[in-house]
Image (cartoon, helix red, strand yellow):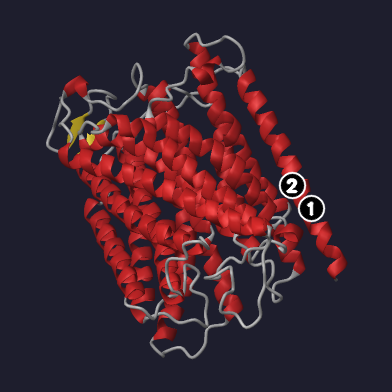
Amino acid sequence: MTMTSEFRTCPVTGLRIHRPAEMLIKVNAVVAIVFLAVGGLFGLLVALTRWPAVHLLPAEWFYLVLTAHGLDVLLVWIIFFEMAVLYFASAVLLNSRLAAPKAAWTGFALMLIGAVMVNVAVLQGGSSVMFTSYVPMMAAPHFYLGLLLFAVGALIGCFVFFGTLVIAKEEKTYEGSIPLVTFGALTAAIIAVFTIASGAIILLPTFLWSLGLVSNIDTLMYKTVWWAMGHSSQQINVSAHVAVWYAVAAITIGAKPISEKVSRVAFLLYILFLQLASAHHLLVEPGISSEWKIFNTSYAMYLAVLGSLIHGMTVPGSIEAAQRAKGYTNGLFEWLRKAPWGNPAFAGMFMSLVMFGFLGGISGVVLGTEQINLIMHNTIYVPGHFHATVVAGTTLAFMAITYLLVPLIFQRELILTGWAKWQPYIFGLGVAGISLFMMGAGTLGVARRHWDITFADAPLQFDYPASAFLMMGLNGMSAVLAAVGGAMFVIIIVGSVLFGKRTSGAQAEAPRPAGPSPAAVGQYGSAGTLRIPGTAVMVAVFFTTFVLYYFVNWKYLAEVWPLR
């Protein structure tokens, strides 16, 4: 192993790893996984309470736990991990030193202090305002202060990433354009600046309001600005996990995108239009003009969707091209059958791709259509949708790349490799069930934020169809399965970091086939072929599903028209 005081060279990938960047990747990833475990436990408690046959928690505890779950998994776990991804995609992939490590450590400390402060505020009671924290509900002052500190810390991390790109360019540590994975991370960081700034802009006056220094916060203004953070944080996730898809495909099988230029244009569409999708949370607000709603939920949204459709074709297409180049050319799908499904990195990445597209993508377009949104907005369909995007999409993709980062960054071999092969499937099946069954229950009208769908203590009774109770029961079972998969992941990764055999030389092992292709992940380049018939069939199936489901929901809408 070649080493200098500041760098070491990975013997497997040939990447030159800056030690301060390596340490920051480690601590951000470890803290991220801790909050994933905590937030996942809260999520299991929420699901067991929403399961009518179990109904675990009383109302006060349910809303407290729901608040903690949303904050820990939608913001804390994912953004901590995204900081690790940003440092990896800049310093490591570009063979560069990290800009301002001390500033990066300051950002990490602020994020950690803020995340702990928010959790303390919630668990102390009196801050059960849920993830959205809508005014006039008021949380404790240190709830808002914790979020502000977390936001400032994440913003510092983004600027360290930008600075690292400048250093790599000036010191010429790479040739040509930055790699596609780094370009995707750059997209995520640009959106993150917009997102985090929006959160700070609205949370600062709200913090002063909680101290009694501001007399009033306008509710519509709060919602409009808050959703520029609340939904746009998911757009950071989309950009980051798409970059992870490309990275895992490149490292595990040497895949290159069908066209680098087209993939980069798709990322550019994210920067220009993806944040506008936050409008679908505001379509029932009477104070916002119809023109604004129509523009955001039609023309602009379709341009953002186009970016995801491009990635949805080029990622599996790149895999097919790489597999066919290896000789897997029989029929439409030999390349897919012979893919390394026993590799948890590849399996997790591909399931993330499929579930994000079929479950999260299609349901997102449905919710982003102004007319259809009105019949689903306040139902449990909405959390069903974002479990398909944030959990089945982002979390599963981040789990996948972690299996590669453990030997590369932590220099440890994986323990429990048999568990690791099964973990993505168990977790993936569980989160797919959560998404499907919540969306099914939402289609039947089940309320989004209600503690008890039986309305046992309500003065006015209301009965959902029996199938709605079945859906919520199946959702609870799926949550248990996802929790098992999540616990397996935490045990494997934490155990590997603490007790895994230290790698040395070429013995560094991630469970992958013949070997990674560092050129594919670290350099500019395209697959050089459009012969991807299997992917074309898969895309046709996707579009058929998309069209059928879209018009089924218009039929549901037509059924409520006589109620006017």
1 and 2 marks in contact (CB < 8 Å):
yes
Looking at the rendered structure, which numbered label has been put on residue 343? none
Residue appearing at x 77%, y 48% in the figure: 552
- Residue 455, given in percent of the width and then of the height, sits at 59, 73
Q: According to the image, label 1 marks what residue?
A: 554
What's the residue type where badge 2 is placed?
Answer: Tyr
What's the residue type where badge 1 is placed?
Answer: Trp
Q: Is residue 563 visible?
A: yes
Q: Is residue 87 visible?
A: no
Q: Between residues 295 and 414, which one lies in front from this camera angle?
A: 414
In the image, 518: left or right of 322?
left
Determine which quarter of the picture holds residue 357: top right
Residue appearing at x 41%, y 57% in the figure: 44
In the image, 517: left or right of 330?
left
- Residue 510, given in percent of the width and then of the height, sits at 29, 28
In the image, 371: left or right of 392?
right
Q: State the count of labels.
A: 2
Q: Residue furthest left?
A: 5
Looking at the image, residue 492 lies above or below residue 290? above
Residue appearing at x 60%, y 80% in the figure: 458
Determine which quarter of the picture holds residue 507: top left
Looking at the image, residue 346 lies above or below residue 548? above
Looking at the image, residue 381 lies above or below residue 432? below
**Which SS class for mark 1?**
helix
Distance, label 1 to label 2, CA atoms, is 7 Å
In the image, 282: left or right of 390?
right
